[in-house]
Image (cartoon, rainbow, N blue to C red):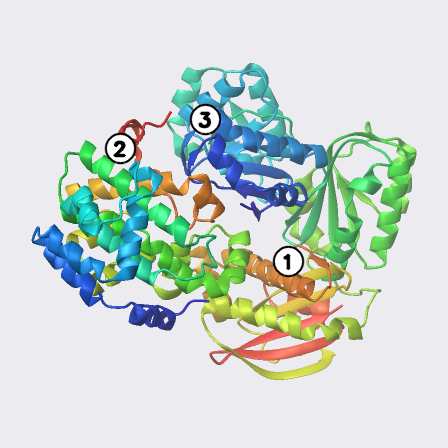
Amino acid sequence: MVTKQDIDNFIEKVPPTPAILRETMRLANNGELSKAAKVAESDLALKSYLINLVNKPIYGFRNEVSDIGQIFGILGLPSTQQTLYNYMLTLLSPKQWELFDLNEKTFHELQANLSLKWKKILGYLNIDDKEIESSVSLLPASIIVSEALFSSAKKDVDLLRSVHHLDYNTILKRLCGTSLFDICVTIAKKWDMSEEISEIVYSASGLNPSNNPDIDNLAKWMHLLLFYELSQPIFIKASLNDFIDFQIEYVEDIYEEFVQVMEIE
Amino acid sequence: MRALVKNGIGLFTPQGFLDGDSTASFLSLEDIEATKNLNVDMVLVSLKKVVFFNKNGLDIFIKLFSKVRQTQNISVGFCDIDHKKYVAITKFYNNNINFSIFNTYKTASLFSSSYKNQNKNVLLYSNDKSQRTAMAIELHDYGHNPIVCQSEEEFLEKSANKSAYDNIIKDTYLGQMGESIATRVTGNAVIYTVSAYLDAEIGNTFNIAYHNNSLNVGFRLFIFDAYKVVNMNIHALNFFSRLATSAAEYNATICFVGLSKDKIQDAFQDTMEDAGIIFYAQMEDILDNKELLKELGASSAANVKNKRAINKTVVAKLPEFIDATVATIEMMTNSKAVKEAAEVNAINIKEKDGKIASSIGFYGDIDGMVILVFPKGIAKKACELLIGEETDDIEMILDTLAELVNIVGGKVKSLLHDHGVNVNITLPRTYHSIDALLEVAQEKKGVQVDLAFNNDKFLFFLTR
């Protein structure tokens, strides 16, 4: 169904960070947002992504925002880095989704929802750190990896799952000894993302708690946030609700706070 | 979302947050239709991985339960709930609970007629006296040993000693239980559960096609669990007599358990005995007596009168069967198959040692049986994906092998469907040894295909 070779082939195909993005990121990290905006303007796909993103209803702007400098200004430095990472991830996403009933628009929506809600959580936790804010952008990589590795074996996976409750992460781990989140970490390394980002997302699988209590706490919030998002009708219909196993015990101690922060009634 | 079917229970496992909006997305109309048509004796929704739910979130599943019960008289409900969730559900539906709630899936299994293991020591408590009694009666009927606590204090005291019990039941509520003819396989005996008053309706509720194909696959002992039967009329009598006569053609035995003399007339029992039906007081009288089991044919299928030849229609579909089998084993073992030889003949297994086998029947537009002979190594490797670890426990391997053969059957069904051929599949049967398989299959002619997976020889046999 999926072999180690398939995983290696997939990782091989992960493109390095494009030069324009690297430069935009470098300038943004130096606090030179206007220069970063000018560089970003020259990549039309990036420009279009940024404009579409901030004009989504969830951002709440009344008038269309189309100037990249203005967009970076609105986002601020931490969110700009996060948004650039989100864009990098879209470069990895398939043109045609087969395993999951997603498309470019719904995938961007998932990214936007995760990003904004993660920001809300970090606000509640009094954390102002661009690496931590950016970490959520790597989370949907697990979905892209599942799509890439399992889409050609969809019927087989369906049959397997009709007799035994197995999520994609478990199937991959048992077949190849590698988890979806191991692959996410490899992608993060290839894209020179910080180790902190990798560690948070790796622990957010709910299966590999971090020894660092701060990272572990963030991973719990991220795990619960992921399942909160995957319980939205659009993503249930996309068959994302059970693509990995929800570790309910892992998030037990933060659940009440989460409900408060997300204003769930 | 589709239910996962195992041991006669269809189980939904939603994750995360359930509210009115999200739950509606879990179940499409097709999902509801598919659930209505499941051949199970219980449909459950596990709330194990649900962190939040409200009444609107559960209502969609309640509607599903109601639709399932309109078509099939089976048990429905929620399982894997903690005390907080139990309180919330009972509060939501107050005095209008017509579904069941089980604290765990394991508890629910105890009330399913497909549950294989009986004689479990079960500690139970409910603050509702009638529930305590109902649960105790049901558990006793299913062959378990219920220990009922009359107060919460008694329950807390006894439940502290967890190792003394196989299962502890609390936060459980029995709604309407199922009354359909459930089927389960214990060892190689097929057990049908019948209840209440048996009349002409038995002809509609009993799945005769399934029964015939179980005979064809090699099952030779059929037990009717009739503890809950109160009486029967002449139509039911005629039905069982005809069933026994047709079973005799396969040298199969039909037994009734728990149908005491006060439930049916002497003349009825005489007629049934004349037709070859044997009566036993207790299920254990048969299942615990290995000699008797052997005598009744549960481990032997020799002398089959109805030997059927493989025909062109089935052979024409051979590529689909091979593809389904190879693809499944390749998928489960991550290895490539090489086809070595194919011939039409009686099954020919050169090396018998270190091999186990499984068979699954199919019926519909075409009918027949697929037999798979595995070296233990391949079987173990294929099962690792499902179990998640290496094991030498042969019972676990055989159980998992049955799941694997179910996948093969499902794939055959889907491939044939793509070619306009509709079939259903029977429960898989497993064999500890090649000798046990040959008792069923040695005189059957069919197509044998020898395959190699990483140099391990694997045998595929298609017959009728």
Helix, strand or loop for disc 1: loop
Same chain for the residues under marks 2 and 1 in the image: no
- Residue A194, visible in the rendered structure: no
On the image, numbered disc 1 is attached to which residue? B428
> In the rendered image, which quarter is residue B161 located in?
top left
Residue position for label 2:
A254
* Residue sitting at x 71%, y 36%: B71
Within-10-Å neighbours for mark 1: few <14, some 14–19, many 20+: many
Amino acid type at image mark 2: Ile
Identify the image quadrant of the C terminus of chain B. bottom right
User: Could you classify mark 2 by the number of other residues whose Cα lies within 10 Å: few (under 14), some (14-19), or many (20 or more)?
Assistant: few
- The residue that disc 3 covers is B54
Asked if marks 2 and 1 touch (Cβ < 8 Å), the reply is no
Same chain for mark 2 and mark 3? The answer is no
Q: Is residue B41 above or below residue B214?
A: above
Q: Are marks 2 and 3 in contact (CB under 8 Å)?
A: no
Q: Disc 3 marks which amino acid?
A: Asn
* Camera-nearest residue between A195 and B166: A195
